Image: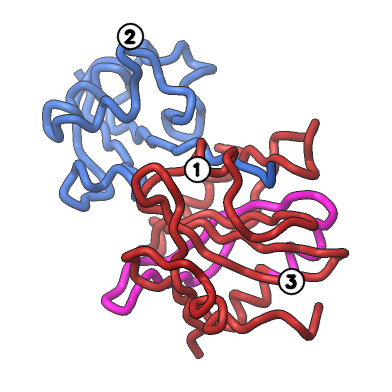
Chain colours: A blue, B red
Amino acid sequence: MSKATIRIPTPLRSFTGGAGEVEVEGATVGQALHHLDRRHEGILSRVLDPDGRIRGFVNIYLGETNVKTLGGLDAALPDRAVISIVPAVAGGLR
Amino acid sequence: MSDSIPSPRNHAATATTGPFPPLRFSSLVQADLIRRAVAGYPHEVCGLLIGKGTAAGVLVERITEARNLRTDRLADRYVLDPDDFLAADSAARREGLEVVGIWHTHPDHPPTPSQTDLEAAWEGYSYVILSVRRGDVADIRSWRLAGSRFAGQPIEEIS
């Protein structure tokens, strides 16, 4: 079990009482995110879909690496890791 | 740069506004937005607004420019590179700031959000859109998601 910090983007801080970072524990990125949801109920529904997969409009980073390239939510969590929830930003004139 | 660019204060008067605190930035920040928007024309250009919430509104201290991953539709779509988001967010946090919104351009189109903009929008961010017509910035507006639609956010210029 590793300790980690999860960085919360501004749009999701309504779940964390305004906190920009939350301390969690887990052996994997997925476990850390579930710990986040136990501490701040409901936030995970904005990050994972009902099947438990990372939503298409969210990116999860472990340090500076997108977890898509690390095995996704099963990526092992080193101690004192920083996990970032990064909103996918897109649009266009049409 | 066009002489006909309305001041941010005028934008606020003409926008349909929602119940949002104003987006506040200096003339230097506005000049940076305009310079990058013009340089990128006729492509869409995008980036982040870095600042913080204050009692007077959302203060933009500076902006960043990000890569557009939609290289197949540079003229009418953007997907902001999440690596650039992470780097900007990390730098902002070190300064005690945060990502408070997104800016992008609409080449030869009005600065109003499209359905594509709406589908990808997040509540809590300000969305600044610059209309760039024939290489000049014609208008700048800010929007925020209000339920299932966008509503205008007043822009205030500060010294």
- Asked whether, in this view, residue B119 is left or right of residue B135, the answer is left
The kind of residue on which mark 3 rests is: Ala
B31 or A77: nearer the eye? B31
- Residue lying at 42% horizontally and 28% vertically, measured from the top left: A60
- Residue lying at 50% horizontally and 43% vertically, measured from the top left: B86
Residue at mark 1: B86
* Magenta stretch holds residue B36: yes
Residue at mark 3: B138
Q: Is residue B99 visible?
A: no
Q: Earlier in the sequence, mark 3 or mark 1?
A: 1
* Magenta stretch holds residue B74: no
The kind of residue on which mark 1 rests is: Leu
The magenta segment is: B34-63
A18 or B77: nearer the eye? B77
Vertical relation: B105 (above or below) A80: below
Residue A11, how many percent across, how many down?
34, 46
Residue at mark 2: A51
CB under 8 Å between discs 3 and 1: no
The kind of residue on which mark 2 rests is: Asp
Kind of element beneath mark 2: loop
